[in-house]
Amino acid sequence: MQKRLAEIEETLSFDDVLLEPQYSEVGSRSDVDTSVSLGKGFKFNIPIVSSNMKSVTGSKMVKALNKLEALAVVHRFCSLDEQIAIFKEGDPMFTACSVGIQNYDYTNVDSFYEAGCRILMVDVAHAHHKRCGDICKWIAKKYPNALLIAGTVATYEGAMFLKESGVDVVRVGVGSGSLCSTRIEAGSGVPQLSALANMPDDIKIIADGGIKTAGDLTKALCLSDMVMLGSLLAGTDEAPGDLITLDGNPYKEYAGSSTHKSNHIEGIKVLVKPKGSVIPIIKTLMEGVRSGCSYSGAFNLEELKSKSKFVRITQSGLAESHPHSIHMRKI
């Protein structure tokens, strides 16, 4: 036991680091190219993926992200016909459908492909699992032209397992989502920055979870190709769900994926305030990413990966990073 404790690795989250400013020749944020290619001819103008959660990605979110040339992933917590209907609201080259690892998911994959879907996401909480590998191998063999995304995992070994199962893009993040309680209820997970840093270099990565700010998004893109957003998109006009009035104030429901299961223990349900349209929110986030690229001397996201350098900070450094020594008031 003592030996096992001595071998414990220190791991980091986004708040534990900053990006050290580098020499730059980037004239302005508009000079930064934020496009990304995931392979097999699939290219996106901005590196954002909407979470395949029932309270995040419906038909309105699909249309909005298609307009921005980002990737929308249809959730799987409704009937197959409803999922296909939501998918058909968008562009088949920007929109993905998600499946699980049950027997009926094999049939669902066939139905999605027949409906024109060419981006498939195998979506399970713990993807470093035989049943996940089995369906991934089956999809990769039957539909080799489809872009296959699978997750989630949090280790190098998990990512390699998925790659060897035919997966094109690995989704990374266990317990890092704002509504996820996996680390508390199951005691399992890896802080997100370290999880991303430990991924193989030769596979595309979608970072999922832990993003609170544009700065977090920039840090994640130093170690991944695209970033999945849930809480930052919840409560927008395009997010599914009606407004709920509580004590005279409007709210929208935001629920973790596992909360749609009768025996869930790893997610919570909350109310969030309405945020307005998702389009200006994403544009503001991307302005922050472009600024982050400029500080690192990067004209594009590939250069951000190669030029970025992290520095470790303390709690005092984190406090110093936020507005401080002032009196805050609304203007």
Image (tube, rainbow, N blue to C red):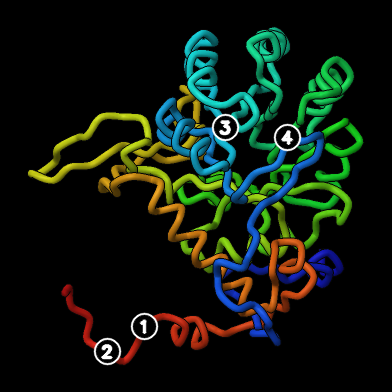
> Disc 1 marks which residue?
323
Q: Name which of mark 4 and mark 3 comes first in the sequence.
A: 3
Residue drawn 65% across the image and 29% down it = 93
Crowd rating for badge 4 (residues with CA inside 10 Å; few <14, some 14–19, many 20+) = many
Q: Does residue 296 appear left or right of residue 289 in this picture?
A: right
N-term mark: 2 or 3 = 3
Residue kind at label 2, given as amino acid type = Ile
Say whether disc 3 or disc 1 marks the residue closer to the N-terminus: 3
Determine the CA span between mark 4 and mark 2: 45 Å
Tell me the CA gap for discs 3 and 1: 35 Å
Looking at the picture, how far across and down is residue 221, in whole percent? Answer: 66, 60
Give residue 138's quadrant in the image.
Answer: top right
What residue type is disc 4 on? Ala
Q: Residue 73 has which mark? A: 3
- Of helix, strand and loop, which one carries label 4? strand
Crowdedness of circle 3 by 10 Å Cα count: few (<14), some, many (20+)? many
Asked if the residue under mark 2 is in contact with the one under mark 1, i.e. CB atoms within 8 Å, the reply is: yes
Which is more toward the observer, 109 or 177? 109
Residue 296, numbered label: none
Q: Separation of disc 1 and disc 4 at Cα? A: 39 Å
Residue indicated by mark 4: 150
- Residue 103 visible in the current orientation: no
Q: Residue 127: x and y, percent?
A: 74, 35
| Of marks 3 and 1, the one in the foreground | 3
Residue linked to disc 2: 326
